[in-house]
Image (tube, helix red, strand yellow):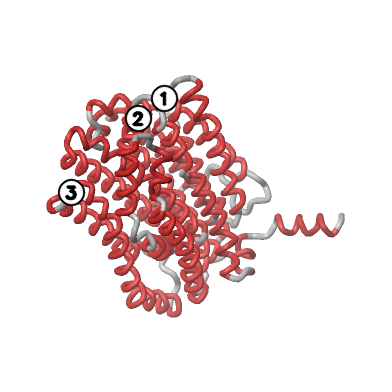
Amino acid sequence: MSRKNKDVTKKQHVTTEQLLDGYPIRKLVIRLGIPAMFAQFFNILYSIVDRIFVGNLPEAGELSLAGIGVSAPALTAISAFAAMVGVGGSSLMSIRLGQQKVEEAKKVICNAFLMLLLLSVFITAIMLAFKKEILYTLGCSHTLYAYAEPYYTIYLCGTLAALCGGGLNYFILAQGKAKEGMISVILGSLVNLALDPIFIYGFDMGVKGAACATVIAQISSMVYVLSVLRKPELQIRVGFGGYRMSIIRRISFIGLMPLLITLLDNGVLILMNATLRRYGGESQGDVLIACATVIQCFMAIVFCPSQGIASGCSTLFSYHYGAKHYEKISQTFRHVFILCALYTGILCIAVQCFPAIFARMFLNDTDTIQLAAQALRMYTMGILGVAVQYTFVDGLTAMGKLSYALPLSLFRKIVYLICIIVLPLFTAPEHVFYAGTISDIVGAGFTLIVFLTVIRKRLKRELENSAPDC
């Protein structure tokens, strides 16, 4: 065997422990965080590409876009459960690897897979049974229902693929396979991009075509993820057996944070849509909701890749927490924040300078484009705070520190909710979009103060004096 082949074979059999212990933290953050960032960027193309094609339909483009926007919170809830199992399971697996408990780590992925299968059946049944009630609760009008309902119904047919593909991809990333994790998401995005114009325009299916393309794309991602997690050279592979309620409870507890945050974000979107409809009136309400949908798309470009950086590096937090390496955890916080701040800072400058360019991707009415551009500027002046939130909240979550992470995230949500309720009472309805800027700035300041003055000292004392509490 040639030296080159020996090196390849050796590389293929490097364990997760050898990878995480053998590389400097800065290089690991780049190696794991950047591919995960790009993966999440492509992941959001599922919804953004749908909305670009739908928003530019020759007739009723704005209504179709608003219909997708109204149904978005309910459909995003599906990804919340995928994140719950994925983050909770992969974090627990990494902690067990850090504690040198390889067999326990193998049981974690099997229990997580079972959870995803059961959740997909339950969620699909519930959300289809009450779809009309759900859509009207989300702010759907009689006019929008004709556009929201078919997209919502077809999208739910891909729940199994969305849960298993999204949830199990975390286990690929947690084993240092950032390239494979990125490929799984890019594959789905490319399939969606290719099928959208065919179904929406070629088959004249409108919003139905957008939903069909998304479901097929999610299935393709799921198939790839499962094939990767069955490869013999992978240290922790997906399978069946070893079920224990204690593992399921622990996965649920650690993953409770991303679930709650996503559900709360959905609740905020519902309140935002309801506020815009109430104060905008029957005529202006739908236009403002269309603007809010454009903002959701842009903020997805901000949130998802930032979350990708944090989730891609979550195995560093989890593993070194299990191994009681405080200094490496501190280094991970620092380098993850720098990477997130660079990304969000660039987007902040771009959207403040050129908001109309982004709005024009989704809308074709000049007046609505101008209104959406103004709304984008109002909403995004403080998005650098997103880097703070994802770095510290997601890092603490990966270590199972829900008692620290949840209050930090809830504080920002509470500020946001107060702004949505109070601002329309004293100013024009469109000024409610300032809620994003205010909550980002205040929330980031609160997180930094609490982490630097309280949490950091407690975490250091815990790891130096006792075994990690997991």
Q: Residue furthest right?
A: 1
Left or right side of 455 for 336: right
Q: Give the structural element (helix, strand or loop) at label 1.
A: loop
Could you say which disc has been placed on residue 428 in the image? 3
Indicate whether 299 appears above or below 344: above
Could you say which disc has been placed on residue 145 in the image? none
Q: Earlier in the sequence, mark 2 or mark 1?
A: 2
Q: Position of residue 354 (x, y in %)?
A: 41, 51
Give the residue at mark 1: 206
- The quadrant in which residue 158 appears is top left
Left or right side of 324 for 2: right
Q: Position of residue 185 (x, y in %)?
A: 54, 44
The quarter of the picture where the N terminus appears is: bottom right
Left or right side of 234 for 120: left
Q: Position of residue 254 (x, y in %)?
A: 39, 57
Residue type of the residue flagged with mark 3: Ala
Left or right side of 469 for 269: left
Sort mark 1 into few (<14), some (14-19) or many (20+) by Cα contacts within 10 Å.
many
Give whichever of 178, 122 is nearer the camera. 178
- Residue 400 appears in the picture as rendered: no
Sort mark 2 into few (<14), some (14-19) or many (20+) by Cα contacts within 10 Å.
many
Cβ atoms at labels 3 and 1 below 8 Å apart: no
Q: Earlier in the sequence, mark 3 or mark 2?
A: 2
* Foreground label between 3 and 1: 3
Could you say which disc has been placed on residue 64 in the image? 2
Q: CA distance from mark 3 to mark 2?
A: 25 Å
Residue type of the residue flagged with mark 2: Ser
Q: Give the structural element (helix, strand or loop) at label 2.
A: helix
